Amino acid sequence: FLKSLKFAAATEAQATLPVNHPPVGEAASTLPQGHPSIGGTMPAVAAGTDNLPKPQWEIPKTWTEEAATQMLLAKFSATDKDARADITVSSFPGDVGGLLANVNRWRRQVNLSAISEAQLSSSIKNLKVQSESGTLVELENPDGKSSGLIGVSVPHNGQTWFFKMIGDAKVVAREKDAFIQFVQNVKLPNAL
């Protein structure tokens, strides 16, 4: 089949374009207005968290600060020999799909199946974070291969703040108390 394919010359291909289609190939001398140049660098994309005031916190002595990626306000790690857990802080406008969607997203990250709305209340705990009521989720897959995860979701001033620790289940278990204390002691921006 592949050997039977025949490609038309540029002028023949040009003739088969739909009406009002811009020229292609060498006949295309200009790009539409506002289009970035071909082969040039892409314009910088502003991160959704760049203009967001950052919370104040004190990190545990066992954690190391890491470079945060575009979608994160902060990233830390906790290690034990060859094992590691990553701790991240992020914030997004609104409820980001709601609590159930976020819990199920975390469940997928440790290879657990999704739960229903009816199962949600038995899978979460309330956690006081300043004057806000956060939601604590603890996940560990019994398969012995997947990571452990502890996550906290906190609605605050039209944003949802996410604090997550994921990684080697033993490191996550060891750092659990430090993680919860870290979250509870965070001073969210513009908090009462």
Image: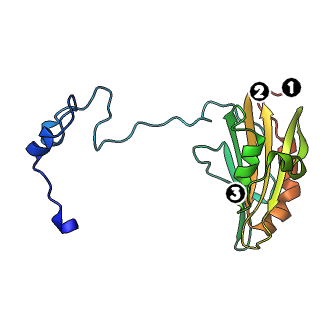
Question: In front: 189, or 157?
Answer: 157
Q: CA distance from mark 3 to mark 1?
A: 34 Å
Q: How is the image coloured?
A: rainbow
The residue indicated by pointer 1 is 192
Q: Callout 1, which amino acid? A: Leu
Point out the tag, 1 or 2, that comes first from the N-terminus. Answer: 2
Q: How far across and down, in percent of the image, does residue 93 sit?
A: 67, 31
Marks 1 and 2, how far apart at CA: 10 Å
Q: Is residue 85 above or below residue 181?
A: below
Q: Is residue 77 left or right of residue 45?
A: right
* Label 3 vs 1, first from the N-terminus: 3
* Residue for badge 3: 108
Residue 139's x, y, as percent?
80, 59
Question: Which tag is nearer the camera, tag 3 or tag 2?
Answer: 3
Q: Secondary structure at mark 1?
A: loop
Q: Badge 2: how crowded within 10 Å, few (<14), some, or many (20+)? A: some
- Residue named by callout 2: 157
Amino acid under disc 3: Arg
Depicted 1 relative to depicted 120: above or below? below
Q: Residue 171's quadrant in the figure?
A: bottom right
Query: Which residue is located at x 89 percent, y 31 percent?
Result: 131
